[in-house]
Structures are given as C-alpha cells and as structure tokens.
Image (tube, grey):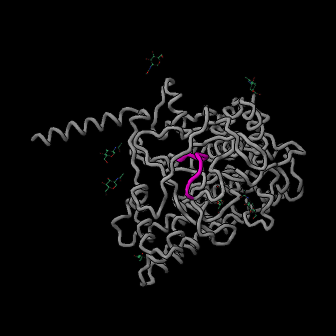
Amino acid sequence: MIRAIQHVIWQILILATCIASALHIDNINHNNVYANLTDSFYSIAIPTPVSNPYLISFNTRVANLIGIDFTLNDTDKMIQYFSGNKLIPGSKPIAMSYSGHQFGYYTPQLGDGRAILLTQIKSPNNQTWDLHLKGGGRTAYSRGGDGRAVLRSTIREYLGSEGVAALGIPTTRSLCITGTDDPVYRENVETGAMLIRVAPSHIRFGSFELQYYSKNQYNVKVLADHVIEEHFSIFKNCKNKYSLFFEQVVRRTAVMIADWMSVGYENGVMNTDNMSILGLTIDYGPFGFVEEYDPDWVVNHSDDEGRYSLRNQPSIGLWNLERLSLALSPLDHGSGLFLKNMTNLLADFMNIYNEHYYMNMNKKLGLTIISDYAQEDRDLVDNLLDAIIGVDYTNFFRELSSTDVFVKNIFVKRKEKFSTWVESYKKRLLKEPNSDFEERSQRMKKTNPKYIPRTHAMQTAIEAAQSKNFSIVNDLLNLYQNPYDEHPEYEEYSLPAPKGFKNTLTCSS
Ligand SMILES: *[C@@H]1O[C@H](CO)[C@@H](O)[C@H](O)[C@H]1NC(C)=O
Ligand SMILES: *[C@@H]1O[C@H](CO)[C@@H](O)[C@H](O)[C@H]1NC(C)=O
Ligand SMILES: *[C@@H]1O[C@H](CO)[C@@H](O)[C@H](O)[C@H]1NC(C)=O
Ligand SMILES: *[C@@H]1O[C@H](CO)[C@@H](O)[C@H](O)[C@H]1NC(C)=O
Ligand SMILES: *[C@@H]1O[C@H](CO)[C@@H](O)[C@H](O)[C@H]1NC(C)=O
Ligand SMILES: *[C@@H]1O[C@H](CO)[C@@H](O)[C@H](O)[C@H]1NC(C)=O
Ligand SMILES: CC(=O)N[C@H]1CO[C@H](CO)[C@@H](O)[C@@H]1O
C-alpha cells in the first residue's frame, strides 16, 4: 500500500519535471552511460582551467533543445562550467578513444585530443545529450598538442554547425563559446576559446575500428550493444539487431551526404574518425559551402589529390561504411549471414543516396510531384548543374526562387546550356498541378536558403571577435539560424566572397 502511494507521488514528481520546461544546471539529470563502459573506450580527462574566462556567445536555441535553463544571475556560474574551470556537480569527464582511416590510411591511436565529454545529461523529455567541451586542455590522446582550440576555428564550428542544423541537416550542435586571454601558440600566437558541442552521441566509425584493430572482438560487441541500447533501442530484442543497426547507419550516412550535396556543403575531412555512428555532421574543420559552383571543388587547399572534393563525398561515404563493416565483422560469429547482410546493405547505399539527393534537388526546383526514379527529373537536375558551373550555387537557387526565369534572364556563364535547360524546365512544370510562379516562388524560398555560413563572412565575425566585439558572431548566428528569411539589412552577408578574398584556412585549430 505504502509502496503504491510512493509510486503515485513519484509519478507526480516526474510529471512535474516534464511540465517544467527546463532544468536548472545544478539540478541537471546526469546520465553518464558512456562512462559506464570500461576504460577501453575512454580515459578520464579533467579540463585544465584558464584565466578569466568570459562569454562570447550563447545559443538559446540549443539550451532550449536540451532543456537547461539559465537565469541571468547565473552567467558567472555558466562561464565557469562551460569553460571547464569548474565541473557541473555529477559530471564524469572523459576523453573518448578511437582510431580511424585518415586520407585512406589506418592510424591506430587518435581519440579526443582536445575535446572532453564533460557529462551526458537527460533532458526533461528523456533525450540523452553529450556535453562536449572543445579546447579544454590536454587529454591522454593529445600527443604533442596542448588540447586548446583557437577562437577562429571555434567560431567557425559554432556558426557552421548551427547553419547546417537550420538547413535541416543532421549535425552536432553548439551551445556556447567562452574565451580566455591565455595565449594559444600555433603558427602565430592566437586567442584561445572553448566551445560546448552537443549531440546525442559522439561515437564514431573509428570508435569501432579501434576495438577491431586492437583485436578486441568482445569490445566490438560491447560497443555495438551500447549504441543499440542507447540509440536504436527498438532493435535491442531482435535476433538480427546488428543488421538492423547497420542498415540505419548506412541509411543515415547516405541521407546526410545527400543533404550536404544539395546545399553544396563540403565536409573537407571525411576520415572515418570524423564520421558519426548516428549519421550526424561532425568535426567542423576546413568545411565550406561551394560558392562558384564546381563539382571538383576542394575546400582544403592541401588536399592535393582532391580526395574529399565535393563530388567525391558520396563515394567516400560508402568507402567509410565499408571500413565500418570490417570493424563490425566480428559480430558475425562465423555464420556468414551478418557479413552477407552488410554486403547487401552497402550495395544499396548509392540507391538510397540518389533517391534522397534527387528528391532534395527536385524540391529546390519547386517540383511537388516527386518520383524517385523518374529519369527525366534526374536529368533536369544534372543538366542544370552542368549549366551553372562558375556561378554562386546558393544565390543561383535563391534567384531561381525569386525570378520568373521564363520572363527574365538569370546570369550564368554557360548561356546556351542554360537556355536549353529553361525549355526543359518549362515543359516539366506543365506536369505540376499548379504552374503559377508566385505559388512556386513561395515554396522555393523555403527550401533555397539566402544565408549560409560563408567563409569570408565568418572571417569578418572572427576579426571583430579578436578585438572583443562579439556582435557580428551573434548577428551571423541569427542569420544562419533563419536562413530562408530575407533580412534585407544584412544583405552583404548573402554575397559571395569579394574578389581577391584569400581563404586563409590553415591546418591548425
Ligand atoms: C552504470 O552501471 C551501474 C552498474 O551496472 C548501474 O547501476 C547504473 O545505473 C549505470 N549508470 C548509468 C547512468 O547507466
Ligand atoms: C538575482 O539577483 C538579484 C540581485 O542580485 C536578486 O535580488 C535575485 O533574488 C536573484 N534571483 C535569483 C533567481 O537568484
Ligand atoms: C521519461 O522516462 C521515464 C522513465 O524512464 C518515464 O516514466 C517518463 O514518462 C518519460 N518522460 C517522457 C516525457 O517521455
Ligand atoms: C539478414 O537479413 C535478413 C533479411 O533482412 C534477416 O532475415 C536475417 O535475420 C539477417 N541475418 C542476420 C544475421 O542479421
Ligand atoms: C588537408 O589535407 C592534407 C593533405 O591530405 C592533410 O594533411 C591535412 O590534415 C588536411 N587539413 C585539414 C585541416 O584537415
Ligand atoms: C561592434 O561591431 C559592430 C558591427 O561592426 C558595430 O556596429 C558596433 O558599434 C561595435 N561595437 C563596439 C562596442 O565597438
Ligand atoms: C575537423 C576535425 O576535427 N577533423 C579531424 C578529423 O580526423 C582527423 C584524424 O583523422 C583529425 O586530425 C581531425 O582533427
């Protein structure tokens, strides 16, 4: 009887937590399930304090997403927690271990060299979130590095990940940036900063590879079971759970890359340790959005062979999934059936990719009747991309959304190819239930963004932030979080890089 009453009270309490929209940081529900694995999967890592940390930008959208609340009074506390100077009571900070294929070659020991998983929390709606501190100092995997991050790369990740999220693409998120005046020594002396990265999990393909190549087959199973339990729990009692899990990874990876390709996003470092097991865009390094459209564009100037060029992303995604399937092969237990299933699932990757990619692209063209396999609709996309080589990718589609192309010209370099395309577009639109331009334009403006994180615009924000003016960082955050709105007062940030803008991305971050 008493137990029953207790149960009711407990239920009411839980209900109250659900109604309360957010938890105060000190009352957060920690849910350190990853740290509950054995230390083959991580090393304990305590952040190294910095002097006089200050807040650079705070993203309330992500705070709401993960259900934590800060009253203004708590700014100081928040800065202490999120710079790594103090630990949120109940945290279990660790650096995750992994290995991976870098530029095609296996590297045995990688791991979080400048990131620390501070804690995992459970939001009021029961979703688990990793709070990852980037730039928090040395870990067991830092090798020669200092474990710090520079303001420059931190702002790029903050704005980049929020922009990618707002375009509807699965990605890790960014909660806030804090700064310090402690110098960080790179090629030059730079300003240091700390980023709080947030995701349901930071487990990578490389997390599995590390166990596989250390010949620890049991741990491959432990990690797979962990991921299934935490992220694919509907499969956990199925006999073929590993096949179902692998199918999800294949599908999510294909969809993520199709999304990248339709907005012209280039990841830049698709090493297997930079691939999320949940199909999230992760590790914003030399990433970028193509401006003058060129399928062979390579954002990393030192990637001479163009391994990670725009057009190579789908095939590299598949190559990475093949490496993952090898790492998962011990789960087969000798029957050959799981291996066979993985082979079949990999064989389906390009179909899933193409289906999703052409669906996205057909939407960008304002089509509503979308048939995955209509060759005519795929040709319409391919022929257009061939015609717009050399013009700004994002602005072209935005212009196509606002200009009636049958009435007024849009500037392209390949005029003849484009006018042939316009004729085929006109013909295709006749099949739509409504060929009215205004109606199509409204729809297209909700799928063709005006504002995407452009390297030169972010550079402006970085330079201002280096002189302690954070207003442009916050302005750009707002623009990239609302990429389909006009914001006429910010027009300049929708423009391509000015002639002569030198992309000064370097390897150091
Ligand atoms: C960690 O493992 C212990 C022992 O199995 C268990 O009691 C506890 O609930 C686990 N914690 C989490 C957060 O899963
Ligand atoms: C916030 O600070 C003000 C003044 O310092 C104080 O009066 C108020 O009670 C504080 N509020 C909370 C929620 O702590
Ligand atoms: C959260 O999980 C608890 C138990 O695990 C459950 O009782 C509760 O209904 C869940 N709340 C929501 C909002 O899903
Ligand atoms: C392989 O896939 C088939 C078809 O989906 C399924 O019935 C079978 O259980 C899977 N086998 C394994 C070992 O996962
Ligand atoms: C760019 O590519 C080069 C050559 O493959 C590689 O060594 C370097 O690490 C890459 N840069 C970044 C920032 O990933
Ligand atoms: C910060 O930069 C913005 C944009 O350039 C400018 O309008 C503002 O006045 C600057 N703020 C300060 C305090 O200098
Ligand atoms: C941006 C980023 O974090 N990229 C990482 C990708 O993986 C390589 C190792 O393969 C790291 O060195 C990069 O830092």
- In the rendered image, is residue 266 in sight? yes
Residue nearest the observer in this picture, 333 or 44: 44
Residue nearest the observer in this picture, 285 or 46: 46
Q: With respect to residue 436, does 113 lie above or below?
A: below
Dividing the image into four equal quarters, which quarter contains ligand 1? bottom left
Give the number of marks: 0
Q: Which residue: 19% across, 41% down?
A: 7
Residue 88 left/right relative to 391: left
Q: Is residue 244 magenta?
A: no
Q: Which residue: 59% across, 47% down?
A: 137
Quadrant of the snapshot with the N terminus = top left
Point out the stretch of residues depicted in magenta: 132-140
What secondary structure is the magenta-colored segment mainly?
Answer: loop
Where is residue 177 shown, x and y percent of the image?
61, 38
Q: Which residue: 38% across, 35% down?
A: 27
Where is residue 367 shown, x and y percent of the image?
66, 52
- In the rendered image, is residue 385 in sight? no
Where is residue 370 shown, x and y percent of the image?
61, 57
Q: Is residue 139 magenta?
A: yes
Residue nearest the observer in this picture, 439 or 484: 484
Residue 464 left/right relative to 17: right
Residue nearest the observer in this picture, 151 or 59: 151
The residue furthest left is: 1
Residue 336 sits in quarter: bottom left
Where is residue 474 shown, x and y percent of the image?
66, 32
Residue 20 sits in quarter: top left
